[in-house]
Image (cartoon, grey):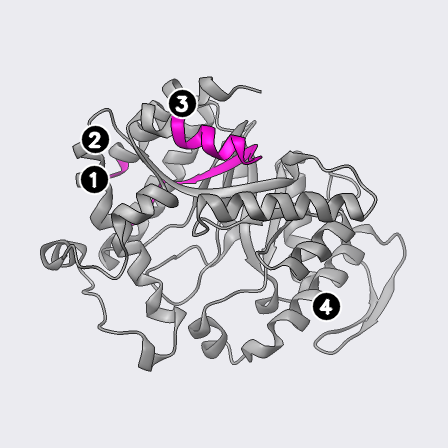
Amino acid sequence: MKFGLFHSVQLPDPTRQQEYYEEALDQVLWAEQLGYESVWFTEHHFSRHGIVSSTFSVLSYLAAKTSDIRLGTAVTVLPFHSPIDIAEQTATVDLLSNGRLDLGVGRGYQWGEFNRLNIPMDEADRRFKEALDVLIQGWTSKVAFDHDGEFWTFNDMTVHPKPIQRPHPPLWVAASSQPSMDRIAQNGWNLLIGQGESFARVGEQINYFGSAVGESGSAFDPYQVTVARAMYTHKDKKQVREDSEVPFMWFKETSAEVGAPPERRGELLPENFSEYRRRFSATSSVDYEEMCENVVLFGTPNELIEKVQLLSDLGVRKIILFVNYGGIESIKVKNSLDLFAKEVMPQFQD
């Protein structure tokens, strides 16, 4: 199996944004030393739930700071961007990293992001499909091309530089519905499965996607699927909960800040994470114990070996670990990465 990181820099304390970025980048460099295969940054806007709004700027920085770890987006929200701009930025990162870019793309799901950008959510699917077509053409076309679509128009277009990876960097598409997985399979792309899906649901999706790839006339490779999972490990089981529960719940609850219309957001969380911790109640809207049982990788190394084995039995071969949720100390994140690399990863070597 292959293991990577899934990063979304949160902002538990608005006065420490530079520190949070520095900690996240330091964790990536540490992960590369430990042998993690990849790191993927996710794009978010307008809330503390995620402050990586310029993903390719971060990846360009990491291209210079790293040498082996692959650099990915999980995901770039295509409806928010000009596809030519994405084609140019991705090609540049691929060039600077000597061909280490993986591009994960999606349609977006947070109502507040669409609302603030004045993009109707019912256009998301059409914008996504058109942007992806233009993006691939921009990467691969050897002659100038025109595009006159529903949302974008380009004339006599050429994209430079071209990506190093041919015909283009690997495309990973976030999806959960069967029609979306059918389209991914028919185009020979790769599947990204989100961190919120239960273990059982992950198995169902991999089975369906594998069948869809076969029906498209290709041989299914389980490495065409990457699964995101929140992870935290410590040798002391009680310490796992003490360290992870409140930060993880803060992360889950901040998604409502822009993820839903105002009337469905509920009470706004305090800006200061210490105040959130003080007010925290086990009656949170998210069931921590149920998540530990069926979704996340929280536990001792032996417990995580069992959970990863379950995922392996379901057909999972690539896992990206979400480790940097808001409010957890960076040294604890690095210790968790170290423990996972030394005690869990060796049990699942390719």
Rendered position, 315 above or below 59: above
Q: Secondary structure at mark 4?
A: helix
Nearest the camera: 256 or 65? 256
Rendered position, 304 above or below 54: above
> If the image is split into quadrants, where does the N terminus sit?
top right
Q: Residue at x 33, y 77 (%)?
A: 264
Disc 3 target residue: 344
User: Which mark is on residue 130?
Assistant: 4
Disc 1 target residue: 241
Which numbered disc, 3 or 4, marks the residue closer to the eye?
3
Distance (Cα) linking label 2 and label 3: 15 Å
Q: Total of numbered circles in the picture?
A: 4
Q: Is residue 11 visible?
A: no
Q: Is residue 19 rendered magenta in the image?
A: no
Q: Amino acid at mark 1?
A: Arg
> If the image is split into quadrants, where does the C terminus sit?
top right
Q: Secondary structure at mark 2?
A: helix
Q: Is residue 284 left or right of residue 24?
A: left
Which numbered disc, 4 or 2, marks the residue closer to the eye?
2
Q: Is residue 17 left or right of residue 281?
A: right
Q: Is residue 344 visible?
A: yes
